[in-house]
Image (cartoon, grey):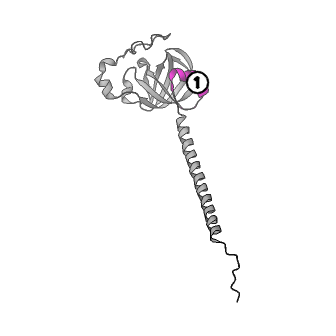
Amino acid sequence: MDLTPRHEIEEPGHLRRAIHRRRRWSIFAITVVLIAAMAVITAQGLRNATLFFRNVDEAIEQRAELGDRRFRIQGRVIPASVQGESGVTTFQVVYGCAVALVRHTGDPPELFKSPWIPVVLEGNWVPGDIQTVAGTDSHYFRSDRMLVKHTNEYASANEQRVSESPPLGFLDTCPFKVPVNTS
């Protein structure tokens, strides 16, 4: 009976090195998977960050670059321009002497009724010949999300500050006149 091993017995140091080599590859594979997962999470966050914020004047100036992509636009609502019908509220927002017509679907927040309220709207540009207080325009802003910029406490505690006229000096340098709300 032959008791010699069929395979050579590896020395203990060689076996240890083989185990460490396998562990290194496992650690390397896990590291690659973690880095890939972090890259996916970062890409997802950056994709959400592309919903960028523009003032009305910037959004109009960059309209060609923005195309029909979604973004956020900020401005003050011109009180005399607000009209609501069948779940669609149309109004004009102004910032830096630039005016954009907005068609907002959904119910606006309660504070939207305050004159000259600053709003942030989320949506995109849509082609269409429209008229604003600043003249004719080739696009309007279609919005489906609205954020109003101050609270009920501010409006009720400072009623003397909320008026039908624009904030002092707000539109002084603009080449157009804003109609006064007669309602």
Residue beneath the point at 43% across and 23% down: 83
Residue 2 within the magenta-colored segment of the rendering: no
**Farthest residue in the bottom direction?**
1
Q: Secondary structure at mark 1?
A: helix
Where 106 sits versus 22, above or below? above
Q: Is residue 32 above or below residue 101?
A: below
**Foreground pick, 149 / 26:** 26
Q: Position of residue 58 (x, y in %)?
A: 54, 22
At 43% from the left edge and 14% from the top edge, which residue is drawn? 170
Residue 79 versus residue 121 in the image, above or below: above
Q: Quadrant of residue 82?
A: top left
Residue 23 in the image: x percent, y percent?
A: 59, 61
Amino acid type indicated by mark 1 = Arg
Q: Which residue is under mark 1? A: 63
Toward the viewer: 32 or 92?
Answer: 32
Judge from the rendering whether residue 155 lies leftward or rightward of residue 53; answer left or right. Answer: left
Which residue appears at 61% of the width and 67% of the height? 16
Q: Quadrant of residue 158?
A: top left
Q: Quadrant of the N terminus?
A: bottom right
Q: 169 and 11: which one is in front?
A: 11
65 magenta-colored: yes
Give percent across and percent down for residue 9. 67, 75
Q: Which residues are magenta?
A: 54-70
Q: Quadrant of the C terminus?
A: top left
Residue 171 location (% of width, % of height): 45, 13
